[in-house]
Image (tube, helix red, strand yellow):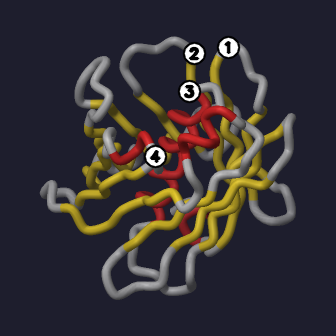
Amino acid sequence: MSQLFQMDRYLIRTKFWRIFGGAFYFEDLEGNLIAYSKQKRFKLREDIVLFSNESCTEALIQIKARSILDLATTYDIIDAQTGVHLGSTKRNFLKSILKDSWTINDANGNPYAELIEDSIAIIRRFVPFIPAKYHFEIAGQQPILMQQRFNPIIKRTDIMIPPGHPLDRRVIAAVALLNSAIEGRQGR
């Protein structure tokens, strides 16, 4: 199993002004690369893969959109090494106008968690240098925090998971990556 899925804290680094697509570097707190993803710009259907490194030879997670050009599509999360369907996530489009919101479903399609923005998305859309703050919410558990650091050139997002949290680390990484990719596509 990847080192990423055993960590309680890591960073996602993205170059803010990337023109031809997104590159997402998952790093430990010392800046060591632990996973990598790249996304082509102007793709109509999301198909995002998280790899173990920049050579893109070992896939860890695959995220596939169920439909094309649907503002509230469902994304399937698949363990790329075993082919196991881990669950899905769906952006709550109307709620996301004011605050980004994602529903996280188990492998059977039952909702059990949410990713909720704590900052105001509509303000961030007009003032892109305001860092976003999110939390994963699962009933009866401490929240998992996801917070951007302010930097106009390189966007860094801290992922902070309480030790022993039951939410699958692969799902956390997939939803964080998908949210970063969608946010990057919106020009933030």
State the SS at label 3. loop
State the SS at label 2. loop
Report x, y in % for residue 61.
45, 46
Kindly identify which numbered label has been placed on residue 186.
3
State the SS at label 4. loop
Amino acid beneath label 3: Gln
Instruction: Compare residues 113 and 107 and report the one nearer the observer.
Output: 113
Q: Residue at x 41, y 58 (%)?
A: 171
Amino acid beneath label 2: Arg
How busy is the neighbourhood of tag 4: few (under 14 within 10 Å), some, or many (20 plus)? some
The residue singled out by tag 1 in the image is 20
Q: Residue at x 71, y 51 (%)?
A: 131
The residue singled out by tag 2 in the image is 41
The answer to whether mark 1 and mark 4 are in CB contact below 8 A is no
Mark 2 vs 1, N-terminal side: 1
The residue singled out by tag 4 in the image is 98
Label 2 and label 3: CA atoms lie apart by: 11 Å
The answer to whether mark 4 and mark 2 are in CB contact below 8 A is no
